[in-house]
Image: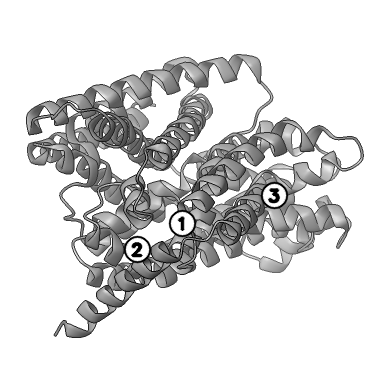
C-alpha cells in the first residue's frame, strides 16, 4: 500500500507546483480567465480534451464497455466526429472572431457577435453556465470519492474531500493557466495509462479468438454492434444516444475556452491533429478495458454489477489490480484523478470567470483594479467549489444507485444543449439573431430538464428517452428553436455587420505572409 501512496503524493506535489508557478502570472482578470492568451498547441489540445473527457471516461465508459460490449465503441465514433468538427471546422473561425472582438469568455463572444444592447443574453448565458457547471463538477467530486473507495478502500467522503481539496488549491492560486498546465500533465498521464492497460491485459490472455468466443458465451449481445438482441428500436436509441455524446465538443464553453486562449491561429492548425488522435486513443482504450474486464471477471449468468460495482464502474480498478504491481496501481489512481481534476479545474475557473467577469465586472458600475479582480476571481472559485461539494454529497445521499456515467452525462448534456446549437448557428449562419440565441439557450436548458424528469418517466415511451438520454432531444430543440425564432424576427442590419466581420477577418488572413 505504501507504494500507492508514494506515487499519489508525488503526483499531487507536481500539480501543486504547477499551480503555484502559474500563480506568478496571474495579476489581473485576463491572466486568471484565459492565461493571457498564451497557450501553445500542445497545452491547448491536451487541456481541451482532458477537460472534455473527465471521470466519465475512466470510470463511466470503461463500465459501459463491460456492460454493453462492442456496441460501446459507438461512443468512440461519436466523440471523434465531435472533436473533428470542433477543431477542424469551427476552431479557426471561432479564434479569429474572438480575437477580433477581444473576447475573454464565451459570453463576451456572444454579446459582441449580436451587438447586444441589453444584458439579457449576458445574464442568461452566464447563469446557465454556472448551474450546469455546478452539476458537472458535482459529478466529478462524486467520481473522486468512488475512485478512492475502489482503488484504496477509503471512505467515499474522505476521498472526495482530499481530491477536491487539492484541485481547489491550485485553481485558486493559478487560475486558467494552472488549469491548462495541469491538464497537459494529467492528459499525458491519462493517455499513457489508458493505452497501456488493455495492451497488457490482451497480451496476458494471448488469443483474440478466445476473447471473442468467451464474450459470446457470457452474452451474445456483447459481440453485437447493436447490443443484446441485435437491431431493435430500443438498441438503436441507445446507440444514437452514445454517438451523440460527441455533440458536447462542438461549442461547449469549457472546451472552446482553450481555442480562445491559444496564442495564434497556427496553434489550432497544429493542435487539431493532437486533439483528434488523443481522443481516438483514450476512448478506444477505455471501452477495450471494460470489454476485457468483462471477459476476465464474469461468466455466463452472472450479473456484472454484482462483481464490478454499480454500472461496472470498478472494472478498471479490478483489471489494474491483477495486471500490475502496487506502485503502478498508484499511477492508475493518479490517472483516474487526472481525468477528474482536469475537468474540475477547468470548470471551476470558467464558472468563476462567469461570476466575476461576465456578471459582476460587466454588469456593475464598479471598476476593479487588476489586483482586486484577481482576488475576486479566487474568492468566486472557492465559493463555487464549496457549492459543488455540497451538491455532490446531497446527491450521494439522495441517489445511492446513481452511476458516474449518467450523472456526468447529465451535466455534460446540459452545457452542450444550452450552448452548442447556439454557437454553431452564431458561427455559420449570418441571419442568426440575438432573440434566436436567447430562445435557443432557453430551449436547450429547459428541454434538458424536461427530458430528464418528464419524458423519461412517460409510460410506453419513457424507456426510449432513457436510452437516448438528454442530449439528442435537447440539442435538437435548441437548434430548431434558434433557427425558427431568427427567421420570424430577422435583423438585416445585424446580418450585414456579421458578414462584414467575416469578410474583414478573411481579408486579414489573406494579407498575412
Classify 10 Å Cα crowding around label 3: few (below 14), some (14-19), many (20 and above). many
Label 2–label 1 contact, CB within 8 A = yes
Residue 423: which numbered mark, if any? 1
Q: Provide the secondary structure element on which disc 3 rests.
A: helix
Quadrant assignment for the C terminus? bottom left
Q: Which residue is mark 3?
A: 473
From this view, report whether residue 317 is shown above or below residue 423: above
Mark 3 and mark 1: Cα distance apart in space: 17 Å
Q: CA distance from mark 2 to mark 1?
A: 9 Å
Q: Secondary structure at mark 2?
A: helix
Q: Residue at x 28, y 56 (%)?
A: 260
Q: In the rendered image, which quarter is residue 158 located in?
A: top left
Q: Earlier in the sequence, mark 3 or mark 1?
A: 1
- Nearer to me, 337 or 124: 124
Q: Residue furthest right?
A: 460
Q: Seen in the image, is 254 located left or right of residue 412?
A: left
Image-quadrant location for residue 267: bottom left
Residue drawn at (67%, 67%) of the image: 208
Q: Is residue 291 left or right of residue 282?
A: right
316 or 118: nearer the viewer = 118
Q: Which residue is mark 2?
A: 94
How far across and how far down the image is residue 64, in percent? 66, 47
Amino acid at each position: 500500500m505504501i507504494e500507492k501512496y508514494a506515487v499519489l503524493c508525488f503526483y499531487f506535489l507536481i500539480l501543486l507546483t504547477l499551480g503555484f508557478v502559474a500563480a506568478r502570472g496571474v495579476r489581473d482578470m485576463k491572466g486568471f480567465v484565459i492565461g493571457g492568451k498564451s497557450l501553445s498547441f500542445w497545452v491547448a489540445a491536451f487541456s481541451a480534451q482532458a477537460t472534455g473527457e473527465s471521470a466519465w471516461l475512466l470510470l463511466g465508459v470503461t463500465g459501459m464497455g463491460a456492460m454493453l460490449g462492442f456496441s460501446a465503441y459507438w461512443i468512440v465514433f461519436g466523440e471523434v466526429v465531435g472533436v473533428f468538427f470542433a477543431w477542424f471546422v469551427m476552431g479557426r473561425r471561432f479564434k479569429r472572431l474572438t480575437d477580433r472582438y477581444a473576447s475573454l469568455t464565451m459570453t463576451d463572444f456572444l454579446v459582441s457577435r449580436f451587438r447586444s444592447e441589453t444584458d439579457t443574453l449576458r445574464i442568461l448565458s452566464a447563469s446557465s453556465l454556472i448551474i450546469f457547471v455546478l452539476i458537472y463538477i458535482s459529478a466529478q467530486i462524486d467520481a473522486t470519492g468512488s475512485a478512492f473507495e475502489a482503488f484504496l478502500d477509503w471512505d467515499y467522503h474522505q476521498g472526495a474531500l482530499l481530491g477536491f481539496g487539492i484541485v481547489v488549491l491550485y485553481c485558486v492560486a493559478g487560475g486558467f493557466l494552472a488549469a491548462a498546465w495541469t491538464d497537459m500533465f494529467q492528459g499525458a498521464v491519462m493517455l499513457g495509462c489508458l493505452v497501456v492497460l488493455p495492451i497488457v491485459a490482451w497480451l496476458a490472455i494471448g488469443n483474440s479468438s478466445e476473447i471473442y468466443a468467451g464474450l459470446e458465451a457470457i452474452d451474445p449481445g456483447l459481440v453485437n454492434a447493436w447490443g443484446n438482441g441485435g437491431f431493435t428500436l430500443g438498441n438503436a436509441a441507445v446507440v444514437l444516444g452514445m454517438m451523440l455524446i460527441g455533440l458536447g465538443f462542438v461549442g461547449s464553453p469549457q472546451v472552446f475556452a482553450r481555442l480562445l486562449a491559444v496564442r495564434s491561429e497556427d496553434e489550432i492548425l497544429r493542435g487539431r491533429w493532437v486533439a483528434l488522435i488523443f481522443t481516438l486513443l483514450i476512448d478506444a482504450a477505455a471501452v477495450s478495458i471494460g470489454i476485457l474486464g468483462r471477459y476476465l471477471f464474469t461468466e455466463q449468468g452472472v450479473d456484472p454489477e454484482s462483481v464490478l460495482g454499480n454500472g461496472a464502474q470498478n472494472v478498471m480498478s479490478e483489471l489494474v489490480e491483477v495486471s500490475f504491481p502496487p506502485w503502478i496501481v498508484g499511477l492508475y489512481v493518479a490517472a483516474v484523478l487526472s481525468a477528474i481534476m482536469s475537468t474540475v479545474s477547468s470548470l471551476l475557473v470558467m464558472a468563476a470567470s462567469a461570476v466575476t467577469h461576465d456578471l459582476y465586472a460587466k454588469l456593475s458600475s464598479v471598476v476593479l483594479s487588476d489586483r482586486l479582480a484577481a482576488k475576486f476571481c479566487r474568492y468566486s472559485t472557492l465559493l463555487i467549489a464549496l457549492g459543488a461539494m455540497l451538491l455532490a454529497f446531497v446527491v450521494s445521499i439522495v441517489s445511492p444507485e446513481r452511476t458516474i456515467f449518467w450523472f456526468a452525462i447529465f451535466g455534460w448534456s446540459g452545457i452542450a444543449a444550452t450552448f452548442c446549437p447556439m454557437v454553431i448557428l452564431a458561427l455559420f449562419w449570418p441571419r442568426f439573431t440575438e432573440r434566436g440565441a436567447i430562445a435557443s439557450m432557453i430551449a436547450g436548458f429547459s428541454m434538458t430538464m424536461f427530458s430528464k424528469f418528464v419524458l423519461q418517466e412517460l409510460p410506453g415511451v419513457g424507456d426510449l428517452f432513457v436510452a437516448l438520454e438528454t442530449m439528442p432531444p435537447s440539442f435538437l430543440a435548441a437548434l430548431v428553436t434558434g433557427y425558427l425564432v431568427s427567421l420570424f424576427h430577422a435583423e438585416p442590419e445585424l446580418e450585414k455587420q456579421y458578414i462584414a466581420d467575416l469578410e474583414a477577418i478573411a481579408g486579414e488572413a489573406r494579407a498575412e505572409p
